[in-house]
């Protein structure tokens, strides 16, 4: 399912002259099926408002631009928002606070009830078990526990199980690694890649963490003042140093180092992953050494 936003607008408290806040000011953006897409931008740039449109949590209409998600035209009055929500799963910031049921099983099962009310008990069990195992938890061990007795990382996984249980094609996560320690972050990102390979087609993450998006996303959109200021691969976005600065963001570490080397006349071509950067630096080093040897032999 491809996502296309055209001139999408949103105003909080639109009817009030005093309180109105223009959160989206003509967003134009296409997210392809299969993308691991990153949305960045400083606080207040409209990231959360935008992603909450994608499953109709913030409904839109034809007066506010156009938004389509696969076959769903969200700006159309007749859009079946319920069917849409089964296809677009949304994981909020600190999803562990969304847990509420007495057991992990019930919590995950809840995600199924509204979308698939006619499933048998056995069918539900299979789906809940699959979801719990997909997020890397042991079903038998965890299903009867209270979600409140789990570790932070486990809670976050259960919350995601409760979203993927309805088999969405698109998974949207707002600040997914906020509050996790470095190891927790690493494990969580690895889970997202597993989900991307096995379970959901498209992943969209909203993040403050430039390193995280540079290393993990195939495409990035930079939000600024309710608009998309730039969209492209991490390399395209983060080598446009001037524009990144203008949007008030920091460069990811690798892009920063690449820029510093460039200032010294050393051109490194990298896709901005640490592994690739190190490889390219060694390559450059070998080139320089070879040139020096050549020079010495003359
Ligand atoms: N519930 C709300 N009511 C009024 N204004 C809001 C609300 N949520 C966000 N805003 C405002 O809308 C703008 C965009 O916010 P948001 O989408 O949360 O940005 P981001 O996620 O990039 O930090 C900001 O000016 C913010 O203050
Ligand atoms: Mg936000």
Image (cartoon, rainbow, N blue to C red):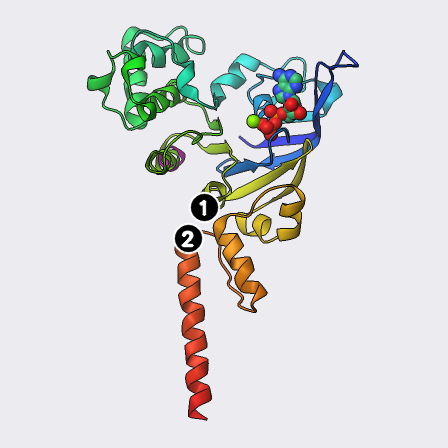
The image shows residue 133 at horizontal and vertical percentages of: 28, 25
The image shows residue 227 at horizontal and vertical percentages of: 68, 34
Examine the rendering and report whether any part of residue 123 can be seen: no
Q: Image point 23% across, 23% down: which residue?
A: 138
* Circle number at residue 215: 1
Q: Quadrant of residue 45?
A: top right
Viewed as shown, does residue 296 lie left or right of 219?
left
Q: Residue furthest left?
A: 141
The image shows residue 201 at horizontal and vertical percentages of: 45, 33
The residue that disc 2 covers is 274
* Circle number at residue 294: none
Q: Is residue 195 magenta?
A: yes
Q: Image point 58% across, 26% down: which residue?
A: 48
Q: Image point 47% across, 24% down: which residue?
A: 93
Mark 1 Cα-neighbour bin, 10 Å: few <14, some 14–19, many ≥20: some
Q: Are marks 1 and 2 in contact (CB under 8 Å)?
A: yes
Q: Which residues are magenta?
A: 193-197
First in residue order: circle 1 vs circle 2:
1
Ligand 2 picture quarter: top right
For ligand 1, tell me if the residue under mark 2 lies within 8 Å: no
């Amino acid at each position: 399912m491809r996502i296309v936003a055209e001139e999408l607008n949103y105003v909080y408290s639109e009817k009030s002259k005093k309180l109105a806040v223009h959160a989206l000011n003509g967003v134009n953006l296409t997210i392809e099926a299969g993308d691991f897409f990153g949305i960045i931008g400083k606080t207040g740039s409209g990231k959360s408002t935008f992603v909450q449109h994608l499953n109709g949590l913030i409904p839109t209409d034809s007066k506010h631009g156009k938004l389509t998600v696969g076959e769903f035209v969200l700006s159309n009055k007749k859009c079946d928002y319920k069917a849409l929500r089964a296809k677009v799963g949304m994981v909020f910031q600190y999803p562990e606070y969304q847990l509420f049921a007495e057991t992990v099983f019930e919590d995950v099962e809840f995600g199924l009830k509204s979308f698939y009310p006619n499933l048998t008990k056995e069918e539900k069990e299979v789906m809940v078990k699959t979801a719990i195992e997909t997020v890397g938890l042991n079903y038998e061990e965890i299903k009867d526990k209270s979600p409140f007795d789990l570790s932070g990382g486990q809670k976050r996984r259960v919350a995601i199980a409760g979203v993927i249980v309805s088999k969405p094609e698109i998974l949207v996560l707002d600040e997914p690694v906020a509050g996790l320690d470095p190891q927790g972050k690493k494990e969580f990102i690895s889970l997202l890649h597993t989900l991307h390979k096995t379970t959901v087609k498209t992943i969209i993450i909203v993040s403050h963490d430039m390193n995280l998006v540079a290393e993990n996303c195939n495409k990035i959109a930079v939000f600024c003042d309710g608009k998309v200021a730039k969209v492209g691969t991490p390399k395209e976005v983060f080598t446009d140093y001037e524009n990144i600065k203008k949007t008030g963001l920091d460069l990811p570490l690798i892009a920063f180092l690449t820029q510093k080397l460039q200032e010294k006349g050393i051109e490194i071509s990298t896709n901005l992953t640490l592994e690739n950067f190190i490889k390219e630096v060694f390559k450059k080093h070998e080139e320089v050494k070879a040139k020096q040897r050549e020079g010495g032999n003359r």
